[in-house]
Image (spheres, helix red, strand yellow):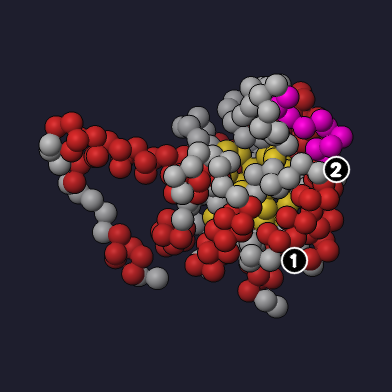
Amino acid sequence: MTVQDDRVDAFRRLHASGCFVMPNPWDVGSALALEQLGFPAVATTSAGFAWTTGRPDNGVTLDQTLDHLRAVSVAVAVPVNADFEGGFAVEPEQVAEHVRRAAGTGIAGLSIEDSTGDDASPLHDVELAVERIRAAREAIDATGTGIVLTARSEGFVVGRPDIDETVRRLRAYSDAGADCLYAPRIATVEQVAAVVAAAAPKSVNLLVNAPFVTVAEAAALGVRRISVGGTLARTAWRGFLEAAREIADGGTFSRFDRLPDVDSLLGSR
C-alpha cells in the first residue's frame, strides 16, 4: 500500500464511528502544530490559505491550491482533507478533471461546494449540483484512491438559510455518491439534528466557527466530524493585528508577553 492508501484507510476509519475534530491549518507550519497537538486529521481552509497569499477567500487559483494541498500532505503524517471550493469549475466534466488532479496530491478527502459566487443566484440549480457531485465521485473512483468525498450545501453561507432546501440537497448529493455531508453555518441543535437525520447512515461534518456547541454535544447529536474552517486562521490574525495596532497606535508592546515557544513545538516532531 502507498502512503496515501494508508491515510485514506485511516480517514475512512475515523468516519466509521464516534466523533473527531479535524481542525483547519492555513499553511505547513500550522498543520504541523495541529498534528503535534494530537489531532487525528486536518483539513485545509480556502479562506485561511488565501489570506496567506494576500487575497480574500476564493481568490486563489487551481494551481496554487494544488500546490498547497501537496505541501500540506507531504508535511504531515495524518490524513488531510481538501477544501476544494467549487472544484474550480462549473461544468461537471471540468470539476471531474480538477478532482482527478487533486487526488494526485496525496490528500485523503475532498469537498465540493454548490455555491456559484453570483449574488443574484448564489446556488447552482439542484440538477447541475447533483451532476457535479456525481462527476466528482466518478473521478475519484477512476483514480482508485478511494478518497472521501464530502458534498457541501452552502445555503446558510450565501444568504439562503432554508433548512428544508438544505436537507433536500444533501440527500440528493448523498444519492449521487458523496461519503460525507456538510451544511456550513447551521448553528442550532434542531438544524444539526435535521442534517444528521437526512444524511444517515452517512457521516456529517459540522462547522464550528462560534462557541455554540461542544464536541460532546455534537457527538450526542450524531455528528461524525467537526471542522473549524478559517476560524483558527482568523484567531491568529486577531492576535497579530491587535499586537501590530498597539505598536502603531501607542508605541507599546504589551502583547509580546507569555508567547508560545514555537520552535519547541515544531522541533519536537
Image coords of residue 158 (percent x, y): 64, 27
To which residue does mark 2 refer? 131
On residue 153, the disc is none
Q: Residue furthest left?
A: 251
Residue 204 seen: no
Q: Residue at x 34, y 37 (%)?
A: 238
Crowding near pointer 2: few (<14 within 10 Å), some, many (20+)? some
Who is closer to the viewer here, 120 or 265?
Answer: 120
| Distance (Cα) linking label 2 and label 1 | 21 Å
To which residue does mark 1 refer? 145
On screen, residue 171 versus residue 40, left or right, reads right
Q: Which residues are magenta?
A: 121-130
Note whether 37 is above or below 158 in the view shown. below
Note whether 231 is above or below 26 in the view shown. above
Q: Residue at x 76, y 23 (%)?
A: 164
Image coords of residue 239 (percent x, y): 31, 40
| Residue 211 shown in magenta | no
What's the residue type where badge 2 is placed?
Glu
Image coords of residue 27 (percent x, y): 46, 56
Quadrant in the rendering for residue 36: bottom left
What's the residue type where badge 1 is placed?
Thr
Image coords of residue 30 (percent x, y): 42, 56
Quadrant in the rendering for residue 254: top left
On screen, residue 83 versus residue 236, left or right, reads right
On screen, residue 6 versus residue 252, left or right, reads right
- Nearer the observer: mark 2 or 1; the answer is 2
| Residue 128 shown in magenta | yes
Q: Residue at x 30, y 38 (%)?
A: 241
